[in-house]
Amino acid sequence: MNWVRERASLLAAVAVGGALIVVVPAVAEIFVLFELTLFLVLAILALSLAWVWGFGGILCFGQSVFFGLGGYTYAIAVINMGDSTVPLLLGILLPALLAGILGYFLFWQRISDVYLAVITLAVSLIFYYLTGASAGSEYRIGNALLGGYNGIPSVPPINVPGLPEHQVVYGDLYVLTAVMLAVVYGGLRGLLATDFGRVVVAVRENEERAQLLGYDVRATKLTVFVIGGAIAGLSGVLFAAWGSYVSPNVFAMTFTAQIIVWVLVGGLGTLSGAVVGCVLVQAAMTWLGEAKLADTNLVLGAAFVVLVLFARRGLVPGTRSLLADLRGRARSAP
Amino acid sequence: MDHALVVGLHLLHAMASLALISVGLAVIFGMLRVINFAHGEFLMVGGYAFVLSAGAGLNLWIAMLVVAPAAVGALGFLVERFVIRHLHGDIIATILATWGLSLFLIGLAATVLGYHQQGVAPPFGTVQFSSYSIGIYTFFVILVAIVTVVSLFVWLRWSRSGLLARGAMQNPGLAATLGADTKRLRTAMFVLGSALSGLAGAVLAPLAGVLPEIGATYVVKAFITVISGGATALTGTTLAAALFGFTSQAAAFLSRPVVGEVALLVVAIVLLRLLPTGITGRYFRKAL
């Protein structure tokens, strides 16, 4: 039974992936593709947190640090170099390096969950303040002006390696992003099926037991964190290339919180859930923003509160218990 | 000499503001262990309750010291009764629900009042120290912070209800066995924490102004302060507020305000690296 279900979900993933890569670009209009590209870029970011938090058990409130660092690295490097191949790799390597340093700092001290969350959040805010304070012509790296809260505009797009005149934009960028998403998703699933993946889940389930069985918990967590940082960096690179723009807002508290919500809405502990949650929430926010029926924050906020209250244990029991409570007959459930 | 006095006053003011921002969260997160992501918005609502009622002609002090805490206390009651209680301490659900609540309150304030800053001029005017002029309101903020923390401490330490509250937070099961109504106590503590946040929001409003999104500037600092404080919420939060307020203000003096903000975060990270259980995890363990 389990075997069948596993194969079925794999088949479904392949089918959805194939449709995203092959069918959608053939039928969708260019504007729709442009917007879809953003959703898929952010879905890669959602996958990175789903991996770090859902499987590694690391409650990271600063996943946007690696995303933003990837974006900034790519923007600065590509403006200076012209060709996008090395900047793209730098935009993955630098966030992975930062994740390594930060992870060493965090996991070798055995800092508990909430503290880890706050430290990663603090790091993202440090980046927010520092990039925000970089306005003025004296803050430049090579040819790239950092621009403070205005960010870096006109970031060149990704190009075919070695051929700067062959730019990957619009429909091509969509295909590239969809392929990247598929590669990251498939890579993580493959990784989870290996011995290492099993150790990762074992550490999440019970750190002490995993350690007593002889596994190096700290090194495992560090590896998970570095992989997550690299994936978030890749997403940041694609984001900067997509909008040809990057600004300190990628480090802001609201953005960080959004990533967490994507993962929670989709369901913690799944990879596909993160992608679905990300696309659903982003689509809802975009639609609300365009429809201008009501304030986006108002509707989204109310939706989350209701979702948590009613859909956590399933819609029906949730409604029942609340109704009972409203009548003042609440009994604590066993 | 006068310069040193002015610098000292600013340092005190930074510590006091940080303590005010955090004290409500010290009760809600530090004692009740509820991760309230809407804490910043509680402060925002307090600020609006004060600014709007004062703008409607109500006495300034009644608006600040009575209306704002009462309004946010009432909000806290509703939130605890209809949201927090149903989550049964589930951390992930609490994060999601309070984050949603935070968005909802921002959206509500923006829809009703608009995305623009409102404020009230700080009362009292200024006082002259040779060549420096300082708003007397600065002294008032420091005074309110001291009075709030001290009275909370005295209540928890020496009153019967304070003892009951501490017992119910430390060991709910035992407290319930001994006949305490822990459910009502939790609600009462949540309302108290909310009211303190409302007071803080109102007291800081004349200096910082209010706008729907102002909560974001408070919430992270408050969490960092309470967490760095450690297990004994009130003492820890006060000590952490003093340390962080001093560091950030001193760094801001020596360089620029943004360096002060960064210094606060860096000190917090280093502190948690050195003392992973917070200040009171190692020192002052017998405090409150």
Image: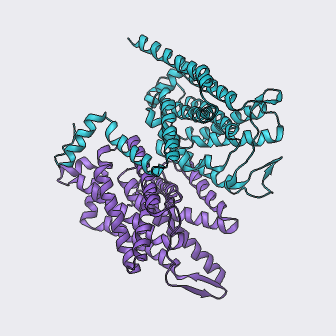
Chain colours: A cyan, B purple
Identified at 47% across, 78% down, the residue is B140
Identified at 59% across, 55% down, the residue is B265
Relative to residue A147, is residue B268 drawn left or right?
Answer: left
When the figure is inspected, residue A158 is found, relative to residue A134, above or below; the finding is: above
Where is residue B279 drawn, in percent x and y?
49, 56
Front-most of residues A163 and A137? A163
Relative to residue A34, is residue A330 drawn left or right?
Answer: left
Relative to residue A219, is residue B39 drawn left or right?
Answer: left
- The reply to whether residue B28 is in sight is yes
Where the C terminus of chain B falls, by quadrant?
bottom left
Residue B66 picture quarter: bottom left
Where is residue B184 drawn, in percent x and y?
23, 55
Identified at 20% across, 50% down, the residue is B176
Where is residue B238 drawn, in percent x and y?
46, 64
When the figure is inspected, residue A53 is found, relative to residue B164, above or below; the finding is: above
Identified at 48% across, 49% down, the residue is A296
Where the N terminus of chain B falls, by quadrant?
bottom right
Front-most of residues A211 and A143? A143
Residue B168 picture quarter: bottom left
- Counting labels gives 0
Front-most of residues A154 and A252? A154
- The reply to whether residue B37 is in sight is no
Front-most of residues B220 and A78? A78
Where is residue A58 drawn, in percent x and y?
51, 36
